[in-house]
Amino acid sequence: MRLRSHRRRLVVWSQSSGSAGASRVARPARTGRFRRGIRIGMLVTLRGLLPLARWVRARWRPLLAGAVLTVVGVVLRSSTSGTVLLPGLLLLLSAPLLPGTPPGRSELERELAAYTTSAQRYDLEATLDQYPDDVTYELRETLARQATAATGPQIPGCGRRQGS
């Protein structure tokens, strides 16, 4: 048994230059360099846009609302609905002034929200008391913020009515 020849099904893609009427079309040389340059340029551009993506992720709600209101205001500028243009522009301009949340903050808040009963909170606070405050300050701030949000406003007459 012998090996098959790889040249058995040879196909001629272009005619030889000696045939009558054949014009040889030259293929552009080095298209690989051009494609590689485009690909590297796109990767560098995307890498440069990552900080912008992080910035937008922290402030996407006011940016989205501002963009929608601005587009509606521009489209309906001749009617009375065009008055939403100003609030849309204000939202777009105020978004850079909002503080961004640290990357792990929402995950930390979700994990700490699992401690719902007061006994669980006391156990967690007892555990945190064993460590210095400079290590646990972020956990304590998040717990205090969640406790304040759970109790509601502390201004008399501003909260929900009891019994109604």
Image (cartoon, rainbow, N blue to C red):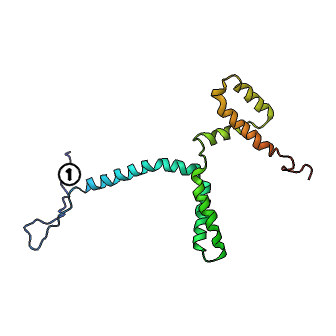
Name the residue located 62 percent from the left edge and 65 percent from the top edge: 86
Whether residue 113 is situated above or below residue 64 in the rendered picture = above
Task: In the rendered view, tell whether residue 78 sits above or below residue 95.
Answer: below
Image spot of residue 36 (x, y percent):
30, 52
Q: Residue furthest left?
A: 18
Q: Nearer the viewer, residue 39 or 101?
A: 101
Residue type at mark 1 is His
Residue 64 higher or lower than 160, as above or below:
below
Q: Position of residue 3 (x, y in %)?
A: 20, 46
At horizontal 84% and vertical 50% (from top left) the residue drawn is 158
Question: Which residue is tagged 1?
Answer: 6
Task: Give residue 149's position: percent from left, percent from top.
Answer: 76, 44
Horizontal side of 35 relative to 17 (left or right) equals: right
Residue 122 vs residue 58, the one in the foreground: 58
Q: Residue furthest top?
A: 130
In the image, taking residue 7 as reference, residue 66 lies left or right, namely: right
Tell me residue 5's x, y (percent). Answer: 18, 51
- Residue lying at 20% horizontally and 49% vertically, measured from the top left: 4
Q: How many marks?
A: 1
- Under circle 1, the secondary element is loop
User: Is residue 150 rendered to the left or right of residue 132?
Assistant: right
The residue lying furthest to the right in this view is 163
Q: Quadrant of the N terminus?
A: top left
Pointer 1 local density, CA inside 10 Å: few below 14, some 14–19, many at least 20: few
Most foreground residue, 138 or 46: 138
Task: Write the residue at 49% across / 50% down.
Answer: 52
Q: Is residue 86 left or right of residue 163?
A: left
Decide which of 86, 121 is in the foreground and name it. 86
